[in-house]
Image: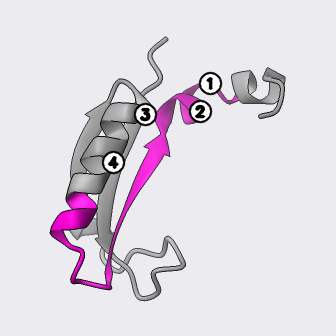
Amino acid sequence: MSKLHLVFGGRVPDPMTLDFNDLESIDIVGIFADYKSAEKAWRAAAQRTVDDAEMKYVVVHLHRLLQPDLIAAAPGA
């Protein structure tokens, strides 16, 4: 199975949280087949909004959501 990653972002009231202000205006950057590609896309999106302290982009490990039993079985997970 591919290790899929989702990159998205949006406005947050506090950059220390993941409480997005408006879920309907979330910026979906894309889904990527590996972490390296996702990180590159995340960095590019974050760099575009570097002057906006209320914008936050994240990488979500979709493969961990799709097969959570693999995480529990993995050593050091």
Query: What is the quadrant of residue 26 in the picture?
Result: bottom left
Seen as rendered, the residue at the extreme top is 1
Query: Which span is picked out in magenta?
Result: 45-68
What amino acid is found at the position of numbered circle 1 in the picture? Gln
Alpha carbon of mark 3 to alpha carbon of mark 1: how far?
16 Å
The image's mark for residue 67 is 1
What amino acid is found at the position of numbered circle 2 in the picture? Arg
Question: Which residue is pictured at 39% across the width and 74% down the height?
Answer: 20
Question: Which residue is pictured at 44% across the width and 16% down the height?
Answer: 2
Question: Callout 2: few (<14), some (14-19), or many (20+) C-alpha neighbours within 10 Å?
Answer: some
Of mark 3 and mark 1, the one earlier in the sequence is: 3
Question: Callout 3: few (<14), some (14-19), or many (20+) C-alpha neighbours within 10 Å?
Answer: some
Q: Secondary structure at mark 3?
A: helix
Of mark 4 and mark 2, the one earlier in the sequence is: 4
- Identify the residue under disc 4: 7
Q: Position of residue 3 (x, y in %)?
A: 47, 23
Marks 2 & 1, CB-CB < 8 Å contact: yes
Camera sees residue 26: no
- Identify the residue under disc 3: 35
Alpha carbon of mark 4 to alpha carbon of mark 3: how far?
10 Å
Alpha carbon of mark 2 to alpha carbon of mark 3: how far?
12 Å
Numbered disc in front, either 3 or 1: 3
- Give the vertical position of 77 relative to 59 (above or below): above
Numbered disc in front, either 4 or 3: 3
Alpha carbon of mark 4 to alpha carbon of mark 2: how far?
14 Å
Alpha carbon of mark 2 to alpha carbon of mark 1: how far?
5 Å
- Identify the residue under disc 2: 64
What amino acid is found at the position of numbered circle 4 in the picture? Val
Of mark 2 and mark 3, the one earlier in the sequence is: 3
